[in-house]
Image (cartoon, helix red, strand yellow):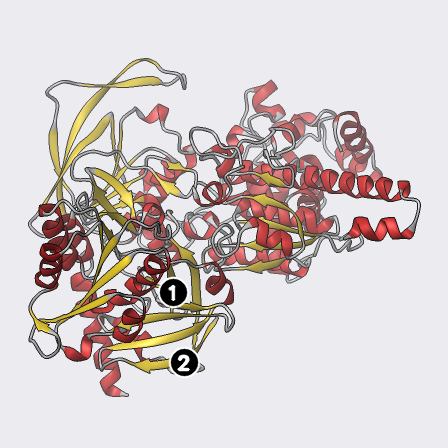
């Protein structure tokens, strides 16, 4: 549904009897006078000692209260802010009506992972940013993200999880390379359209960054598994321990009958700063630190994977991954868990909620500081870091004020663990295995932004392998876009074959063609 | 799950395992490795592929007991399964005809050396192999190496087999005797460090196949990073083979000991548990 079609559809939905009736229950003014409810969360001093989820979720009463705030606008701008195009007012009104299971069903029409998105999406810069409340009334937005999480959790806890409807199975084999958010969103949509979908994953666990990257206290793995189970019930096949491009190439898989592919292999190459001493023991990339703890469960004594997480941990960077790392270090018992970031707190790319949670949990923020060298002991273990103070200069290309070193401001900090969280680069494995695939100088796969199609027509791509490092929800949006355009692409191919066959004069010619 | 179909003891320290992995058997080339995770709670460790049989759909790995994971691997029997195995990983060895190759393998390093020796020989090179170990029973795959080598020199620390001396002693004798166009070395990091020092003296291009600590093995974590020519490289996606003269082996040796104490403790716990059973 695009353009006019979508607007008309939304209008029709909005004029359904139950919605009209619900709207008439309260005056708009009564709705807008209600206060936005905060997400209930566990106490900082209790939660920073374990990996249990921080946010507790809304109660039924709270959810209905929050849903009532939504005035069900005739022109719901919130939807334009959602990369996967959730029918936001509809699911919220279902909550207001107390039809929580229906609300979850609405979410799943366009979103394969609502319980995940309700937890990790930056709603404040997406749907909630373009909500009527902040736009027209300078009031806090309807808590769309919290409501999404509520509906998804309610459905899961009810034991009555619905499996989305699937159109007639068409037997056409397609594959996703990678089982992260882009791959899962793609798989969900393709399965709904009747395709035979296989998702390949390099690691032993399905879920990509949702499993190895995002910590349990923000996104429990079991939540991800429940959503993956739904995809399995829809017929999606998952194959772990399989690296497309290495275990078998795209060509090999094409010979096995796959018609088209979606590459969602992620941005799996951590950046380092290339400063002296960065290879001392105890200095990790955030990918390694988080993988050891989230995926390999290094914090549990009965698991074999070790991790060095000391008393004085410095995390370099200001993004969500840096916040995840530093809050993890605190939970592993660090007395000092520090963020070291070269700009001020205003320029930090992390979500406000993550920064707030980190501060509450006793994380130190050393803003306008930048590491320039590490020092180790005779065993090669990091012991100290030299840090330089920074000040903000003129804005750079990103529009943020450029950090400038303050001469003579260097000082040292004692550290026994450092986590470098200064971004990632695209994983080179797929591009390396396909010389004809067009990539940018950064190593990202070049695609048509509308169709997500790469320079190889049967190959689509989305998520961080295209963007270079973005969010779960943008990857999911890409996966959905890729699914829609791959469907069009395959159907066009089918039409081409049919019209070709029509031109043949004898069965013999058709058989020759088939061979 | 990957089933073990054959097991052969090379010594009380070293075992050969033939494991079902049809895709990997088909795709692998000399120099490639796999990552295995033995069980649900196991760690991910890299192991180089020694041989593969496409018909049977199997690969062969050689394991030496060094820590908890390798002991658990060593103890697996035929029909047991490995929970997870992924590969082939890394760049395969660049094989071309260069003339005379001196291949040096220490301990279980001979296992990854075998496919390289075979491929180098098949490419038309003259191949001289030097194999070394502490003592006679730790020399492995000698017959297979002989099949693809023009000459094989055996060195043992205690002189219990072949000549007494270090691998570099055996190599230097060959280097002094005839012109060597390229050296390939696989073995413990400390051995490769001294091989690199030797061949640098004689200005012979030298490839070293590195085996570092890894987690994912696909470039994602950076645990395997080494300094090569002053630049940080990832062994898993940039290697595992590098110009030995450019590798900072001292840094690599330190990094290999990252979890030394943890490993010793884990080993103790493992033995205690074992004794109780």
Residue for badge 2: B6
Between A283 and B189, the residue placed more toward the observer is: B189
Q: Is residue A325 left or right of residue B196?
A: right
Residue at the far right in the pictured view:
A505
Give the SS element for disc 1: strand
Q: Earlier in the sequence, mark 1 or mark 2?
A: 2
Between the C-alphas of marks 1 and 2, the distance is 17 Å
Please tell me whether mark 2 sits on a helix, a strand or a loop. Answer: strand
Identify the chain of the residue marked 2, using the numbered disc in the image.
B
Q: Measured along the vertical axis of the image, is residue B255 above or below residue A439?
A: below
In depth, the one of B138 and A177 nearer the eye is: B138
What residue did someone put label 1 on?
Answer: B36
Q: Is residue B50 left or right of residue A429?
A: left
Residue A463: % across, % down = 53, 38
Q: What residue do we see at 63% from left, 24% from top? A: A132
Residue A480: quadrant of the picture:
top right
> Looking at the image, which residue sits at the far top?
A394
* Image: A456 above or below A113: above
């Amino acid at each position: 549904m695009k353009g006019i079609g979508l607007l008309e559809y939304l209008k029709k939905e909005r004029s359904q009897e139950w919605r009209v009736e619900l709207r008439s229950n309260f005056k708009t003014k009564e709705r807008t006078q209600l206060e936005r409810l905060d997400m209930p969360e566990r106490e900082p001093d209790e939660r920073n000692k374990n990996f249990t989820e921080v946010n507790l979720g809304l109660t039924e009463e709270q959810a209905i209260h929050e849903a009532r705030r939504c005035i069900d606008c005739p022109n719901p701008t919130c939807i334009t802010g959602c990369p996967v195009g959730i029918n936001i007012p509809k699911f919220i009104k279902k909550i207001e009506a107390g039809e929580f299971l229906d609300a979850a069903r609405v979410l799943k029409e366009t979103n394969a992972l609502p319980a995940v998105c309700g937890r990790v999406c930056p709603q404040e810069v997406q749907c909630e940013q373009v909500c009527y409340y902040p736009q027209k009334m300078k009031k806090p937005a309807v808590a769309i993200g919290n409501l999404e999480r509520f509906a998804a959790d309610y459905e899961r806890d009810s034991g009555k999880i619905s499996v989305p409807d699937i159109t007639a199975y068409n037997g056409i084999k397609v594959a996703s390379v990678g089982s992260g958010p882009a791959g899962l969103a793609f798989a969900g949509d393709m399965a709904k359209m009747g395709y035979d979908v296989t998702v390949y994953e390099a690691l032993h666990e399905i879920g990509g960054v949702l499993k190895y990257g995002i910590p349990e206290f923000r996104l429990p793995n079991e939540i991800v598994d429940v959503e993956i189970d739904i995809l399995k019930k829809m017929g999606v096949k998952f194959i772990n321990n399989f690296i497309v491009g290495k275990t078998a190439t795209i060509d090999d898989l094409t010979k096995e009958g796959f018609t088209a592919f979606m590459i969602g292999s992620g941005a799996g190459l951590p950046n380092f700063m290339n400063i002296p001493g960065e290879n001392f023991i105890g200095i990790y990339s955030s990918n390694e630190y988080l993988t050891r703890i989230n995926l390999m469960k290094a914090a549990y004594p009965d698991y074999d994977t070790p991790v060095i997480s000391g008393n004085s941990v410095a995390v370099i960077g200001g993004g969500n991954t840096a916040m995840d790392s530093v809050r993890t270090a605190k939970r592993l018992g660090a007395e000092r868990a520090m963020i070291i970031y070269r700009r001020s707190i205003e320029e930090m790319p992390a979500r406000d909620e993550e920064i707030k949670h980190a501060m509450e949990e006793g994380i130190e923020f050393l803003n306008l500081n930048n590491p320039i060298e590490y020092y180790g002991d005779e065993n090669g273990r990091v012991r100290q870091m030299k840090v330089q103070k920074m000040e903000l200069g003129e804005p750079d290309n990103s529009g943020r004020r450029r950090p400038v070193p303050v001469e003579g401001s260097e000082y040292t900090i004692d550290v026994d663990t450092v986590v470098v969280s200064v971004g990632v680069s695209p994983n080179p494995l797929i591009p390396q295995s396909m010389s004809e695939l067009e990539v940018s100088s950064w190593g990202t796969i070049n695609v048509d932004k509308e169709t997500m199609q790469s320079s190889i027509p049967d190959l689509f791509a989305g998520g961080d392998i295209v963007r270079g490092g973005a969010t779960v929800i943008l990857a999911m949006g890409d996966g959905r876009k890729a699914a829609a355009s791959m469907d069009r692409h395959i159907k066009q191919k089918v039409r081409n074959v049919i019209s070709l066959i029509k031109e043949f004069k004898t069965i013999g010619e058709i058989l020759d063609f088939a061979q | 799950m990957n089933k073990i179909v054959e097991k052969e003891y090379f010594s009380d320290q070293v075992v050969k395992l033939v494991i079902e992995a049809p895709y990997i058997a088909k795709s692998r080339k000399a120099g490639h490795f796999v990552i295995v995770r033995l069980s649900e709670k196991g760690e991910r460790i890299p192991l180089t592929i020694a041989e593969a049989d496409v018909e049977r759909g199997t690969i062969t790995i050689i394991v030496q007991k060094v820590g908890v994971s390798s002991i658990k691997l060593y103890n697996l029997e035929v029909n047991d399964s490995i929970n997870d195995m992924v590969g082939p990983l890394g760049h395969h060895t660049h094989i071309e005809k260069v003339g005379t190759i001196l291949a040096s393998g220490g301990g279980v390093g001979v296992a990854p050396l075998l496919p390289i020796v075979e491929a180098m020989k098949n490419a038309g090179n003259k191949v001289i192999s030097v194999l070394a170990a502490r003592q006679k029973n730790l020399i492995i795959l000698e017959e297979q190496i002989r099949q693809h080598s023009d000459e094989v020199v055996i060195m043992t620390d205690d002189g219990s087999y072949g000549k007494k001396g270090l691998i570099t002693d055996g190599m230097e004798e060959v280097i002094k005797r005839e012109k060597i166009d390229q050296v390939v070395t696989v073995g413990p990091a400390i051995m490769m460090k001294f091989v690199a020092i030797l061949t640098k003296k004689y200005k012979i291009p030298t490839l070293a196949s590195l085996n570092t600590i890894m987690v994912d093995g696909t470039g994602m974590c950076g645990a395997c990073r080494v300094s090569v020519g002053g630049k940080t490289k990832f062994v898993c996606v940039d290697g595992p083979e590098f110009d030995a003269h450019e590798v900072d082996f001292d840094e690599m040796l330190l990094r290999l000991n990252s979890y030394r104490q943890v490993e010793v403790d884990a080993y103790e716990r493992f033995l205690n548990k074992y004794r109780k059973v």
